[in-house]
Image: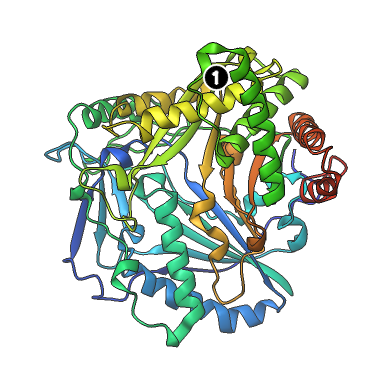
Amino acid sequence: MASSSFKPVKVQHRCKVAPPSGSVTLGDCTTLPLTFFDIHWLPLPPVELLFFYDFPYPLSEFTHTLLPHLKHTLSSTLIHFYTLAGNLSWPHHEPNNQPMIHYTEGDSVSFIVAESEANFYHLSANHLKDAVESRPLVPHLPVNGSIVPMLAIQVTVFPNSGICIGVAHHHSICDGRAFSHFMKTWASLSKLGDASPSLAPDSLPFSDRTGIKYREGITERYLNELDRFMKRSSDQFPVVSEMNHRRLRVMDIKLQPNLVRATFELNQANCRRLKELVFAQYKKKKDHDQQTQSMIPPSRLVSICAYTWVCLLKAEAKAGESKSNETRFVVNADCRARLDPPMPKSYFGNCVKPVVVIAKKTDFMRGDGFAVAAQLIGGAVHKGVVNNPDILNGLENGVSDLLEVQSSRVLAAAGSPQFGLYETDFGLGRPKKVEMASIDRTGAMFLKESSNLDDGGLEFDLVLDRKQMNAFVSLFIGGLNAAQCSEPSLCPTLIHSLPSLSQRS
């Protein structure tokens, strides 16, 4: 059921934004086949991001000043990121039977301006709120059909309060690092305006996919599994063949009722204490278990993920909603620097390897559960990535693992504090809030650096059933407060930076 504070938006303007005519000089039609890194993400629903900015001016001020500028700089940015203006298809008769991104002169991005009467400060805050409240701010990106677009944008104006720049993109076009590169490039051109110099060569996106070498067995297996997936009929999207293309579709993940969203902000002191909490369990386990002498000390990020994973499983059990005893944690590892030859950091595409940890929930319910989870995550990353001479080894099951995620409780870590999303400044200052709306479908935790860039911390978003969220907040805060009892001065900061159980939309 929608919240009483849920408010639809009123569309004020629709248009298409394309690179300037003749600016993409790779020929009238550019075709890029997807690599196996890209193909892996074909069945996933779009990635939906929301960037909230203070803008204490009326709609007319936005329409006459900022809107033309945003569209102009987006057009200029698409010169370099032209694939985002293109379309995705999977032709039947391509020589390699691969999905393709096509860009043709005149291809464009859907751009919508909407007005909202909702409370901007409520939507951009960290406290608990109904997840459905973010939905009107998300642009619609078609994902079912023989040819689908790659990107859609919606700017929602909250008169005299702020704006929200909502973006939705097909995950098969690029990963999080690459998309943050696009957003920060657009923002930089917008902030600098006419004073903006030409982009430095090392800041340009690298779109040449030929550097990712073909790996026998991976691509064919992905395509066979996805071909069967795409052919499955449903009442809403019947299987048809149009223009000699397969009909594309994504996983039909329904929005569940009664979902709430919250942001958990951890400053540097909180992060340190959380790592110490996990490490204390780790050390105790190591001292009592001779078979764990090679245990890897947990990093800050691994500690936070492990603690969140265990608190989430305990919250499900506390709420009486724990089903299968199997649970999985998924984290994506960037492969750019680990390929042979390596790909540049500016590579625009997907180049991540999912690292999957499979465990039994009962393994985490005893006293050393946080240490067990941290060791499993850290060990999987070291085995599959850090100490793996062949980074592509283990990718063969990527699509089947993705399509089977609904068979057990999966927590995936989306985003990264390294992406610098709070540096996306369009000339309006840093974002007040950055949110991944699409985790209401995927169930992921969305990691990013703290909105307070000076404290060296980080934050993450979760969307859960309200009953589960209340249990999770209690467990998460309770565990940290218990760990920090020897350092009481940190407790007020912790309490004020995390969602309160009493704050309900």
Q: Position of residue 269 (x, y in %)?
A: 71, 49
Q: Secondary structure at mark 1?
A: loop
Can you say whether 399 is above or below 347 in the image?
above
Foreground residue, 136 or 372?
A: 372
Q: Which residue does the image show at 25% across and 25% down from the upper left? A: 221
Q: Is residue 3 left or right of residue 109?
A: right
Identify whether 382 is placed above or below 180.
Answer: above
At label 1, the amino acid type is Ser
Viewer-side residue, 243 vs 246: 246
For the point 32% across and 62% down, which residue is it?
205
Where, quadrant-wise, is the N terminus in this rendering? top right
The mark tally for this picture is 1
Question: In the image, 324: left or right of 98?
Answer: right
When asked about the image quadrant of residue 369, the answer is top right
Picture coordinates of residue 234, whole percent (x, y): 44, 27
Q: Residue furthest bottom?
A: 195
Q: Point out the residue furthest to the right here.
A: 502
Location of residue 253 with respect to 265 vertically, above or below: above
Residue at (67%, 28%) from the top-left corner?
280
Can residue 439 be seen here?
Answer: yes
Q: Is residue 443 left or right of residue 473?
A: left
Q: Which residue is mark 1?
A: 408
- Residue at 47% across / 66% down in the picture? 184
Residue extending farthest to the left is 95
Q: Is residue 116 left or right of residue 85?
A: right
Residue 158 visible in the picture: no
Dot 1: few (<14), some (14–19), or many (≥20) neighbours within 10 Å? some
Q: Residue 132: image x %, image y %? A: 68, 45
